[in-house]
Amino acid sequence: MNSKRMEVKGIEVDDETRCAHYHTVRDIIALKFKCCDTYYPCHSCHEEVADHPPVRWGKEERDTKAVLCGSCGTELTIQQYMTCKSSCPQCKAQFNEGCQNHYHLYFEV
């Protein structure tokens, strides 16, 4: 698994990027925050660990690699992530479908 090489900051982050806030079997993505170019498992981890407010990725930045699959370590572009139907295009691991409800916290929608 590649994600061990990619640093993911947060609260109680495991080897597949789950955290204290989101830790079901499908909570296996981390998001790179534009403001600090750092991966976090979720917005709550960023809020608790970072010393600054979050900045969302703009619509014109959808080709930016900003999503990390915690299963295989593949970095997805925002567009790939938003259109992958909650499954990693590389390893086919299933992502939490509920993450779509939080897109507005990370990306301009």
Image (cartoon, rainbow, N blue to C red):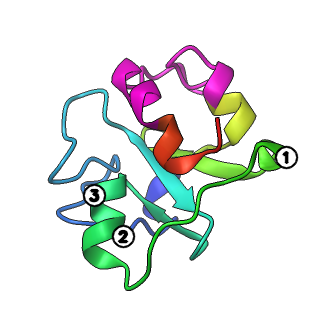
Which amino acid is tagged 2? Lys
Name the main secondary structure of what is drawn in magenta.
Answer: loop
Task: Tell me, yes or no, if residue 15 can be seen here.
Answer: yes
Taking depth in this image into account, of 93 and 76 the one nearest to the observer is 76
Within-10-Å neighbours for mark 3: few <14, some 14–19, many 20+: some
Secondary element type, mark 3: helix
Percent x, y of residue 101:
41, 27
Q: Disc 2 and disc 1: Cα gap in Å?
A: 26 Å
Residue contact at pointers 3 and 2, CB within 8 angstroms = no
Q: Are marks 2 and 1 in contact (CB under 8 Å)?
A: no
**Mark 2 falls on what kind of element?**
loop
Quadrant occupied by the C terminus = top right
Q: Mark 3 or mark 2, which is nearer to you? A: 3
Q: Which mark is residue 60?
A: 1
Whether the magenta-drawn stretch holds residue 61 is answered as: no
Question: Is 100 one of the magenta-colored residues?
Answer: yes
What residue lies at 60% left-to-right and 56% top-to-bottom? 56
- Residues packed near mark 1 inside 10 Å, few (<14), some (14 to 19) or many (20 plus): few
Which amino acid type is shown beneath numbered disc 3?
Ser
Instruction: Please give the name of the residue rendered at 57% of the width and 65% of the height, measured from the top-left corner.
Output: 55
Mark closer to the chain start, 1 or 3: 3
- For disc 2, the marked residue is 9
Q: Residue furthest top?
A: 85
Residue 27, position in %: x, y? Answer: 31, 35
Whole-percent x, y for residue 6 in the image: 52, 65
**Left or right, residue 85 beside residue 30:** right
Q: Name the residue tied to disc 3.
A: 44
